[in-house]
Image (cartoon, helix red, strand yellow):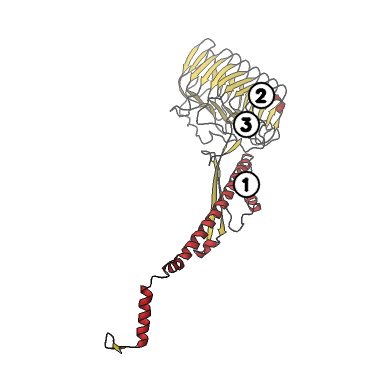
């Protein structure tokens, strides 16, 4: 026997084992087989992952299509004024009917706000792994998101009352020609917009939260007028009126042949305008006092805003010549784009009657009031948008406006179209 380190003797058996190990380590035959055994799980895993990744891609594509369809449907329901819970329930039921698992299906909906017309639909669900299960446990999340824009053509007449019949009314021989805008009413009445008698309306379209009566009297560009739509948002609702100053002087005693120039501020007595009256630029507060423009008066003002509160009224009559312009919506004035501004609780009836031949530019915003154009009144304007609790044109009243090139920030956006933007 041979001695080994440490003084021991190497037995023949040990020598044989040692020899076989040395021969095995020195033998280069079978390397490929060994490498194959080592790498085979990785190779199989790669094939499994690639196959399954392709499957996941197909499933995500299917979910993208389903989410797009759900977003269009949700936008249409939203435009019809359906409540948020009912919208989400309808979308979920549609997705479940297409085979998506109820146990892991997740749905998120972000709705339009006063500052955004975007609606976001997010859908996801968990799915089991197959071949790739050998690499790691768990499930795979398939997710999709679609964003739609809820918008329509802007309105230039809007009735805010939520239930009145004829919240927007044309009757008698009244005529309205509205270019580049629509007529909208938030009333859910079957006659939310009412066209009666021999009245005539020319507009891009009519959009109502309820129904429309007398469509035969209207000429529109849209294929069908929109009924049962969500309420059109009031773009001015968040604005706060200025406070009335502590002291307001009495108004002048106007004479038919006099010439007057008025400065911005407030008045403690009604303004009954006669003669030739010019309003200098600024804000005019009418707190509980009326503004009446009498027959044959000539009234003008540029960059002016009239604030009405506590029952203040407008009364334009006779053969007055009126030319009033609000501050441009792109200006730095305190209330750009607003010509007449009534408090939400003003509760007045405003009348433009007789043969008034007038030109207004800016918004006539009287949300708590009734706005009436009666008699033989006529009003031409550069996108003079009229918002009232109710808006009515009677007799031979004639109103025309053109909002084709309107670029201001206070657009009266209606519920009309749903378009995918992402």
| Vertical order, 272 against 67 (above or below) | above
The image position of residue 32, as x and y in percent, is: 43, 66
The answer to which of marks 1 and 3 sits earlier in the sequence is 1
Label tally: 3
Q: Nearer the viewer, residue 324 or 287?
A: 324
Question: Circle 3 sits on which residue?
Answer: 184
Q: Residue drawn 58% across and 22% down?
A: 401
- The quarter of the picture where residue 120 lies is top right
Asked which secondary structure carries label 3, the reply is strand
| Vertical order, 95 against 23 (above or below) | above
| Vertical order, 57 against 388 (above or below) | below
Q: Mark 1 vs mark 3: give the one in front.
A: 1
The answer to which of marks 3 and 2 sits earlier in the sequence is 3
Q: Residue drawn 65% across and 17% down?
A: 376
The image position of residue 169, as x and y in percent, is: 67, 27
Q: Residue furthest top?
A: 257
Q: Residue drawn 41% across and 70% down?
A: 29
Task: Characterize the local packing of mark 1: few (<14), some (14-19) or many (20 or more) Cα atoms within 10 angstroms.
Answer: some
| Residue 87's disc number | 1
Asked which secondary structure carries label 1, the reply is helix
The answer to which of marks 2 and 1 sits earlier in the sequence is 1
Q: Nearer the viewer, residue 388 or 351?
A: 388
In the image: residue 348, left or right of residue 268: right
The image position of residue 259, as x and y in percent, is: 49, 12
| Residue 201's disc number | 2
In the image: residue 1, left or right of residue 357: left
């Amino acid at each position: 026997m041979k001695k080994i380190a440490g003084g021991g003797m190497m037995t023949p058996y040990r020598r044989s084992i040692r020899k076989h190990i040395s021969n095995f380590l020195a033998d280069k035959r079978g390397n490929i087989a060994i490498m194959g055994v080592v790498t085979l799980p990785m190779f199989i895993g790669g094939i499994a992952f690639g196959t399954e990744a392709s499957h996941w891609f197909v499933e995500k594509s299917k979910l993208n299509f389903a989410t797009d369809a759900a977003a269009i449907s949700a936008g249409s329901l939203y435009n019809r004024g359906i409540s948020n819970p009912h919208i989400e329930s309808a979308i979920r039921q549609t997705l479940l009917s297409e085979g998506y698992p109820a146990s892991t299906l997740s749905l998120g909906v972000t709705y339009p706000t006063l500052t955004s017309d975007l609606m976001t639909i997010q859908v996801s669900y968990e799915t089991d792994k197959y071949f790739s299960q050998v690499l790691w446990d768990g499930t795979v999340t398939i997710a999709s998101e679609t964003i739609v824009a809820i918008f329509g053509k802007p309105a230039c007449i809007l009735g805010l009352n939520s239930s009145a019949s004829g919240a927007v009314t044309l009757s008698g021989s009244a005529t309205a020609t509205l270019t580049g805008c629509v007529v909208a009413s938030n009333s859910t009445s079957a006659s939310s917009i009412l066209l009666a008698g021999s009245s005539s309306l020319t507009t891009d379209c009519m959009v109502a939260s309820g129904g429309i009566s007398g469509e035969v009297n209207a000429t529109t560009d849209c294929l069908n007028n929109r009924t049962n739509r969500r309420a059109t948002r009031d773009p001015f609702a968040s604005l706060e009126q200025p406070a009335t100053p502590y002291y307001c002087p009495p108004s002048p005693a106007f004479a038919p042949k006099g010439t007057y120039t008025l400065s911005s501020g407030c008045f403690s007595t009604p303004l009954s305008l006669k003669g030739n009256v010019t309003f200098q630029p600024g804000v005019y507060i009418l707190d509980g006092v009326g503004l009446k423009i009498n027959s044959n008066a000539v009234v003008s003002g540029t960059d002016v805003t009239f604030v009405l509160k506590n029952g203040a009224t407008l009364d334009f009559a006779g053969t007055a010549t009126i030319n009033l312009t609000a501050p441009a919506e792109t200006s730095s004035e305190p209330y750009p784009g607003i010509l007449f501004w009534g408090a939400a609780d003003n509760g007045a009836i405003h009348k433009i009657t007789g043969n008034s031949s007038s030109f207004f530019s800016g918004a006539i915003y009287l949300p708590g009031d009734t706005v009436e154009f009666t008699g033989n009144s006529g009003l031409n304007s550069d996108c003079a948008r009229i918002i009232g609790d109710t808006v009515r044109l009677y007799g031979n009243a004639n109103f025309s406006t053109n909002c084709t090139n309107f670029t201001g920030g206070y657009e009266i956006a209606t519920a009309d179209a749903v378009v995918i933007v992402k």
